Image (cartoon, helix red, strand yellow):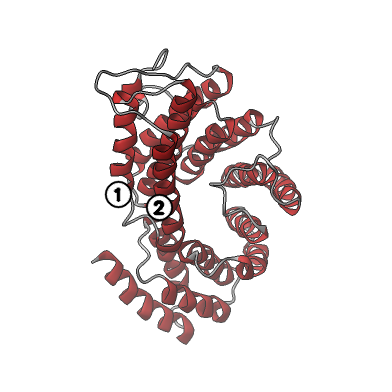
Amino acid sequence: MNGLNRRSVIAALGGAGLTQYILQAAVAPPEAVAATARNGISVSDQLLTSLQSTTDALRQADASHGSGNLARAAAAHLKVLLRLLKEGTYKEATGRRLAAVTADTAIQTGWYHFDSGAHTVAYNLLLGALRAAHASGDSRLRAGALSFLAIFGYSVGDPRDAVTAARTARQLIADQDAPALHAMLLTRQARGHARLREGRQALAALEEAQALCARGRGQDDPHWLYWINPGEIMGQTGSCLLDLGHPDQAAEAFADARNAFSTDEIRTRAQFLSRAATAQMRAGDIDAGSVIGHEVLALVAGVRSARLDDNLATMLTEARRYSSAAPARELLERGQTVMEERAA
């Protein structure tokens, strides 16, 4: 691979802030990708199609059952791709496709680790994914890597990094007909604004995301972006309103979102419903919050996700404020049993 150190595609890039890498992703030109290794594996299009299908299958499993059982499998799959980058034989076009599959897989592997609570591992994987996406020459993959770094920023890092990452990603795909991808990035930007208590900016980003989502998919929207629909936009709107201290409005947004989710996407549905229950209770409606809370607890068996556990804990903490009420006590009793089972 000319101009790109194949051994460092998924390296831990420590020693500088995230913003440096975000900005570097926007300005650096793609590097040449080709390799000839003695006795190396010949990388064919058929092989890459098979490897991509494995990444896609893991992605769909994550939406249903969470990341807890996927991180190790995805890491093993990523090692195969890295070995091909290091020891394979391929020409320029094939090398770029190999880098693209590697980037997609590294993004997903980073996400599975993040959803499992392994934040440092996830961060390094996502930075490596950004490098691999850069080598692929596919600006949509670079935007995808930045979108997950945005989640890192507004969840456990600096929300300002989330805003910067999402804006930079949109600049990278400015020439693409990809309204769904732009809409997704705007929701990530909005979440960053909401964590910063920048309500006007958050709501403006969400309004634009909703308008783009209504256009449907464009010819350049990537196959891996399967989750953008009106329900996702409304669910993210509810999350922003909850962060902004508007639980009444958040509860309304979550109510609008709930019927748009696929029944197969159990983890995603449980995430939003747990926040909906929290919103209802913060708004003072313990009865509605408890009903939704019981619905969530019935969904989560077999779904392994540290992020979901955090949302469940927040929901139950909110219920404790109403522990003198029978609906809250019943929810807390059931919730304690479920959380103990999840921790076992």
CA distance separating discs 1 and 2:
9 Å
Residue furthest top in the image: 3
User: Which of the two discs, 1 and 2, labels the residue nearer the N terminus?
Assistant: 2
Q: Is residue 230 visible?
A: yes
Q: Quadrant of residue 342?
A: bottom left
Whether tag 1 and tag 2 are in contact, CB under 8 A, the answer is yes
Front residue of 227/309: it is 227
Determine whether, in the image, residue 299 is placed left or right of residue 161.
left
Residue 205 image point, x, y percent: 70, 44
Residue 70 image point, x, y percent: 33, 53
Front residue of 239/301: it is 301
> Can you identify the residue that label 1 sits on?
73
Look at the numbered disc 2 and give the secondary structure of its residue: helix
Image point (54%, 17%), residue name: 28
Residue furthest bottom in the image: 326
Residue 30 image point, x, y percent: 52, 19
10 Å crowding of disc 1: few (<14), some (14-19), many (20+)? few
Q: What quarter of the picture does the N terminus occupy? A: top left
Q: Quadrant of residue 44?
A: top left
Front residue of 89/309: it is 89
Image point (53%, 32%), residue name: 142
Which numbered disc covers residue 58? 2
Look at the numbered disc 1 and give the secondary structure of its residue: helix
**Tag 2: amino acid:** Leu
Q: Is residue 106 visible?
A: no
**Tag 1: amino acid:** Ala
Image point (70%, 30%), residue name: 175
Residue 13 image point, x, y percent: 36, 25
Above or below 34: residue 152 = below
Determine whether, in the image, residue 283 is placed left or right of residue 65.
right
10 Å crowding of disc 2: few (<14), some (14-19), many (20+)? some
